[in-house]
Image (spheres, rainbow, N blue to C red):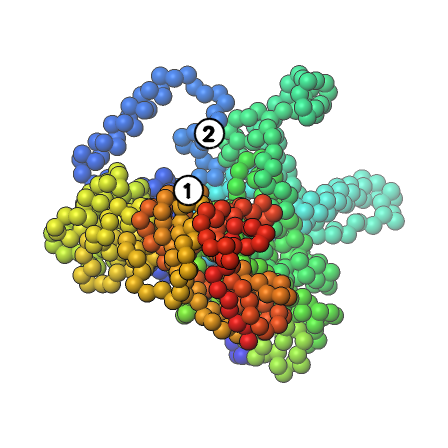
């Protein structure tokens, strides 16, 4: 361990280690998982569509495009565009990178993603480089490792729903400004050249990635703020003027210079002054493009802001500097803490330590570390403010300040390890990190609406915002839910960190090894666990791979629905027949030869009904939005869950039946159930209800199941029938519904004894519940007073 620490203290070894870590985490397997649908697939098809093959295909694309250009050329030039014009530069980096990767590397998922992965590598190198320059090689490696464990870096570097260019450009700009020094040797001249190159490249990448506000203003103002906006440089300039005057005075009038001493220079930061002036210039350009001065309109609500009898109003035009259109009104869906969840989940597990690390660095004795603390704080805070403003006035964006958190944490950890004694309050800091990690990890496991894991939905939707991507509950890694690994790895990191901060010196080495190993595993998890495993359920690639594995000569492929370029990308030599209606799908599955069919998952319920018992098989249903069907099951097994859930004949066996007809609203009849007679307190148990559909049900109804005893209601088994695969609105007369579900256990606080089991249907939410009326049932099975539920049996809890 000590040998490794000594080697990492050498900057060439540390730099090589950082580069290897970035390459190992970000580059492998970019094409091993499919495009997440619909968001990532839509980006790929819009900005980097597949190359056109035949002349006919080329003509079908080119001719309409040429005609559109001709028609547009005849129109007058739009002086106030309301949408992104052709050739726009700001905030176009992701699109340009994906298109370049398709053309220069390969027309594949790997080709489109690789340029973004390289931008991720640049982000790691620039951020770790700042730590390496100011605090040594070990700090650089720690910074890189912490940064690579953050999902905001890994996921953006390996998917097209990315704004990694904003973070990469900001890191390069700050590295360049930080490294600008007056050269005093040949080596220093080379170092200055690298800093200048980083600065120039960073300015280009930042502007094309995030525009003037997010890409340029944030790093420039952060560096300016960390350097007191160049105030020390201005003061040193004044001292230089005075000292120059004193020299002249000594030559011209020596007696007048007696008793006057030269001023001592304070090492003013000229780069901070340049950054301040540059930021003022960028803000001026933004203000000029976004706002205009007009005569006030007193009837406008809210009142317009006035300066010198003129109102400052947004132009409402697309801005070439901003890379978007500044809304006159705020988007109230975004409150000023709307990025907090993005920051917390996107920097898990180390991000919670960043505020403490920043404050500790700012209050430290080492001037370089104080500078890093101030820079990281200004960078993170500036990115947060800019992101909040952008979301309210322009649109969704991804917070790009996460490298600042890794920088502060890496440098602070290095300072802690460099000291023999732990800093004051170390145990409290360790405890805080552990509690925060447990709390955030618990949030990612939180159960909201039935079947929806709200925290996991947030991190699944991290790069697209809101709750747009539903977490696939079938996603498992090594037999455990994928989302559970987030908490387990977080606990591994936090547990090791707690021991480092609280244990005796002899235990800190092994504990640090555990924490760093957990960090490395977290980095690998996001790249090679979470991302590809969720892609199995969020991409159609798996469906087409199954088709390629099973097809034989003469087999046909039909597709119902729009999957963009996915059929071409994942089954390039297939020539699918595109269908437009479910009736065509039914006919295709009735052909004598083998037919494979890709159809939306929402069609499965109606298709099951219309097939009327004719053979069809589900070969792959891992993709949540579609399924692969066939009229033959050769080479695999049938995975159709509806064969067990929706029958076209009465079930062969039922554990119990009602003594007379039980009918809800003349639409659904309860014909039987299976339920244990005795269960343990708090134990899970399985229940099956059997229904016959008499008339179309309509609406979206849930099944209620209450367990009532003398001491009150011991629990309930309310749920969506048949796992919500087919809502009640799709049930058809003549169907037999087999609703199998698991009751999570009756409240252990209730006494043992016998409980009455009630069931029925309900819709709505608390407090506006509404039960489906009972149209027919024996009197002793009805509730008194009537609540439209029926008593089916009793159960004993022991």
As helix, strand or loop, the secondary structure at mark 2 comes to loop
Image position of 228 with respect to 428: above or below? above
Rounded to the nearest angstrom, the CA distance separating label 1 from label 2 is 42 Å
Classed neighbour count for the residue bearing mark 2: other residues with Cα under 10 Å, few (<14), some (14–19), many (≥20): few
Q: Is residue 118 left or right of residue 494?
A: left
Residue furthest to the bottom in view is 506
Disc number placed over residue 83 in the picture, else none = 2
Image position of 387 with respect to 795: above or below? above
Q: Are marks 1 and 2 in contact (CB under 8 Å)?
A: no
**Residue 8 visible in the displayed image:** no
> Of the residues under marks 1 and 2, which one precedes in the sequence?
2
Residue 189 x %, y %: 53, 54
Classed neighbour count for the residue bearing mark 1: other residues with Cα under 10 Å, few (<14), some (14–19), many (≥20): few
Residue at image position (40%, 49%) is 668
Image position of 211 with respect to 105: above or below? above
Residue at image position (17%, 48%) is 590
The quadrant of the rendering that contains the C terminus is: bottom right
Residue 497 x %, y %: 61, 71
Total numbered circles: 2
Q: Is residue 638 left or right of residue 120?
A: left
Disc number placed over residue 698 in the picture, else none = 1
The quadrant of the rendering that contains the N terminus is: bottom right
- Choose mark 1 or mark 2, whichever is in front: 1
Disc number placed over residue 538 in the picture, else none = none
């Amino acid at each position: 361990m000590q040998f490794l620490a000594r080697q990492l203290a050498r900057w060439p070894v540390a730099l090589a280690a950082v580069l290897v870590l970035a390459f190992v985490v970000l580059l492998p397997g970019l094409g091993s998982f499919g495009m997440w649908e619909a968001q990532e697939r839509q980006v790929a098809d819009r900005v980097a569509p597949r190359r056109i093959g035949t002349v006919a295909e080329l003509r079908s694309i080119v001719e309409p495009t040429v005609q559109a250009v001709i028609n547009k050329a005849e129109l007058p030039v739009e002086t106030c565009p309301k949408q992104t014009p052709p050739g726009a530069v700001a905030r176009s980096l992701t699109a340009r990178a994906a298109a370049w990767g398709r053309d220069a590397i390969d027309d594949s998922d790997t080709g489109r993603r690789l340029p973004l992965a390289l931008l991720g590598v640049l982000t790691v190198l620039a951020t770790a480089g700042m730590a390496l320059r100011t605090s040594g090689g070990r700090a650089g490696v720690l910074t890189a490792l912490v940064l690579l464990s953050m999902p905001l870096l890994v996921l953006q570097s390996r998917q097209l729903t990315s704004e990694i260019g904003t973070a990469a450009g900001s890191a390069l700009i700050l590295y360049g400004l930080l490294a600008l020094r007056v050269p005093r040797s040949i080596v220093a001249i080379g170092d200055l050249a690298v800093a200048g190159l980083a600065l120039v490249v960073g300015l280009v990448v930042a502007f094309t990635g995030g525009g003037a506000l997010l890409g340029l203003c944030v790093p420039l103002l952060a560096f300016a703020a960390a350097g007191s906006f160049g105030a020390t440089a201005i003061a040193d300039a004044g001292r230089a003027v005075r000292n120059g005057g004193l020299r002249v005075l000594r030559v011209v009038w020596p007696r007048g210079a007696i008793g006057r001493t030269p001023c001592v220079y304070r090492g003013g930061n000229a780069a901070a002054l340049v950054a301040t002036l540059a930021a003022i210039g960028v803000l001026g350009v933004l203000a000029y493009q976004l706002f205009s001065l007009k005569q006030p309109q007193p009837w406008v609500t809210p009142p317009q802001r006035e300066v010198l009898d003129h109102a400052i109003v947004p132009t409402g035009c697309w801005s070439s500097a901003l890379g978007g259109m500044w809304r006159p009104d705020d988007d109230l869906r975004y409150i000023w803490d709307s990025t907090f969840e993005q920051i917390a989940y996107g920097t898990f597990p180390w991000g919670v330590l960043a505020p403490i690390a920043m404050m500790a660095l700012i209050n430290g004795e080492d001037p370089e570390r104080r500078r890093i603390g101030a820079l990281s704080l200004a960078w993170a805070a500036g990115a947060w403010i800019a992101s909040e403003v952008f979301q309210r006035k322009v649109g969704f964006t991804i917070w790009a300040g996460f490298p600042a958190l890794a920088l502060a944490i890496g440098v602070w950890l290095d300072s802690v390890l460099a000291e023999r004694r732990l800093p004051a309050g170390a145990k409290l800091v360790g405890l805080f990190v552990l509690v925060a990690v447990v709390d955030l990890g618990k949030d990612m496991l939180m159960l909201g609406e039935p079947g929806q894991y709200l925290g996991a939905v947030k991190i699944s939707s991290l790069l697209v915002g809101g709750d747009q991507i539903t977490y696939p509950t079938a996603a498992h890694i090594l037999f455990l839910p994928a989302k559970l690994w987030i908490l387990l790895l977080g606990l591994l990191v936090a547990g090791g960190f707690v021991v480092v901060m609280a244990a005796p010196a002899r235990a800190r080495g092994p504990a640090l090894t555990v924490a760093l190993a957990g960090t490395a595993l977290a980095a690998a998890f996001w790249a090679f666990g979470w991302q590809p495993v969720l892609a199995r359920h969020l991409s159609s690639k798996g469906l087409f791979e199954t088709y390629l594995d099973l097809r034989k000569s003469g087999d046909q492929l039909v597709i119902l629905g729009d999957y963009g370029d996915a059929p071409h990308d994942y089954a390039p030599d297939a020539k699918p027949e595109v269908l437009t209606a479910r009736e065509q799908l039914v006919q295709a599955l009735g052909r004598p030869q083998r037919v494979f069919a890709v159809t939306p998952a929402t069609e499965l319920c109606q298709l099951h009904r219309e097939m009327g018992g004719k053979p069809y098989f589900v070969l792959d249903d891992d993709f949540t939005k579609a399924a692969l069907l066939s009229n033959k099951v050769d080479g695999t097994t049938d995975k159709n869950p509806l064969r067990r859930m929706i029958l076209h004949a009465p079930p062969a066996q039922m554990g119990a039946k009602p003594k007379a007809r039980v009918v809800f609203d003349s639409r659904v009849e309860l014909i039987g159930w299976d339920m244990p007679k005795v269960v343990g307190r708090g134990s899970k148990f399985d229940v099956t209800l059997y229904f016959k559909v008499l008339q179309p049900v309509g609406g979206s109804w849930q099944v209620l199941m209450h367990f009532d005893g003398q001491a009150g209601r011991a629990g309930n088994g309310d749920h969506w029938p048949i796992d919500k695969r087919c809502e009640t609105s799709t049930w058809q007369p003549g169907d037999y519904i087999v609703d199998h579900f698991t009751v999570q256990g009756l409240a252990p606080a209730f006494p043992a004894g016998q409980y009455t089991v009630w069931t029925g249907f309900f819709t709505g939410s608390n407090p506006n519940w509404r039960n489906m009326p009972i149209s027919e049932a024996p009197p002793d099975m009805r509730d008194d007073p009537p609540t439209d539920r029926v008593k089916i049996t009793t159960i004993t809890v022991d």
